[in-house]
Image (cartoon, grey):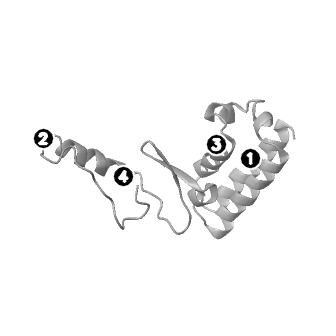
């Protein structure tokens, strides 16, 4: 596979995303998550891409992207994981995807509990989605 092949596919996917009202950053996120490419490589159209994206991986990416567009599945479910704070969480449709603003809740609680007696206690999150 050549870099031209990859970017022809990439540009077609961006166009399809726009037509389907899917944010284009989701395509980048999915590619970066599954290939472990650097975001700069993707933006600069680096030749390094052809070393990490095999024809088989491109086929898989295309299948997942089509599911995103047609079945409206979140990219986190398609990739099977999501980063939340300093954790890499496995997610499936049976697990709620942690929302970014929930990270702020942890920061607020941590700040408020600095002077409390329970500062060194154990905290448990039950029944709130991913359990992160």
Element on which disc 1 rests:
helix
Mark 1 closeness class: few <14, some 14–19, many ≥20 residues within 10 Å: some
Identify the mark nearer the N-term, 3 or 2. Answer: 3
The image's mark for residue 10 is 1
In 3D space, how far apart are the residues under numbered discs 4 and 1 (Cα atoms)?
30 Å
Identify the mark nearer the N-term, 4 or 2. Answer: 4
Pair 4/2: label in front = 2
The image's mark for residue 115 is 2
What residue do we see at 76% from left, 37% from top? Answer: 52
Pair 3/2: label in front = 2
Element on which disc 4 rests:
helix
Pair 1/3: label in front = 3
What residue do we see at 74% from left, 30% from top? Answer: 46
Q: Position of residue 20 (x, y in %)?
A: 64, 63
Mark 3 closeness class: few <14, some 14–19, many ≥20 residues within 10 Å: some
- Nearer to us in this view, 82 or 42: 82
Mark 4 closeness class: few <14, some 14–19, many ≥20 residues within 10 Å: few
Judged left or right of residue 108, residue 86 is right
Identify the mark nearer the N-term, 2 or 1. Answer: 1
The image's mark for residue 101 is 4
In 3D space, how far apart are the residues under numbered discs 3 and 4 (Cα atoms)?
22 Å
Above or below, 82 against 95 in this view is above
Judged left or right of residue 20, residue 84 is left
In 3D space, how far apart are the residues under numbered discs 1 and 3 (Cα atoms)?
13 Å
In 3D space, how far apart are the residues under numbered discs 3 and 2 (Cα atoms)?
41 Å
Element on which disc 2 rests:
loop
In 3D space, how far apart are the residues under numbered discs 4 and 2 (Cα atoms)?
24 Å
The quarter of the rendered structure image containing the N terminus is top right
Mark 2 closeness class: few <14, some 14–19, many ≥20 residues within 10 Å: few
Residue wearing tag 3? 32
Identify the mark nearer the N-term, 1 or 3. Answer: 1
């Amino acid at each position: 596979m050549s870099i031209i092949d990859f970017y022809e596919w990439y540009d077609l996917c961006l166009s399809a995303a726009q037509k389907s009202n899917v944010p284009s950053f989701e395509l980048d996120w999915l590619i970066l998550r599954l290939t472990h490419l650097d975001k700069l490589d993707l933006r600069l159209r680096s030749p390094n891409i052809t070393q990490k994206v095999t024809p088989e991986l491109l086929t898989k990416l295309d299948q997942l992207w089509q599911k995103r567009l047609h079945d409206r599945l979140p990219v986190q479910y398609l990739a099977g994981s999501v980063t939340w704070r300093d954790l890499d969480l496995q997610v499936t449709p049976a697990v709620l995807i942690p929302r970014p603003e929930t990270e702020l809740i942890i920061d607020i609680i941590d700040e408020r509990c600095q002077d409390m007696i329970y500062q060194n206690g154990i905290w448990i999150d039950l029944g709130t989605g991913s359990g992160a």
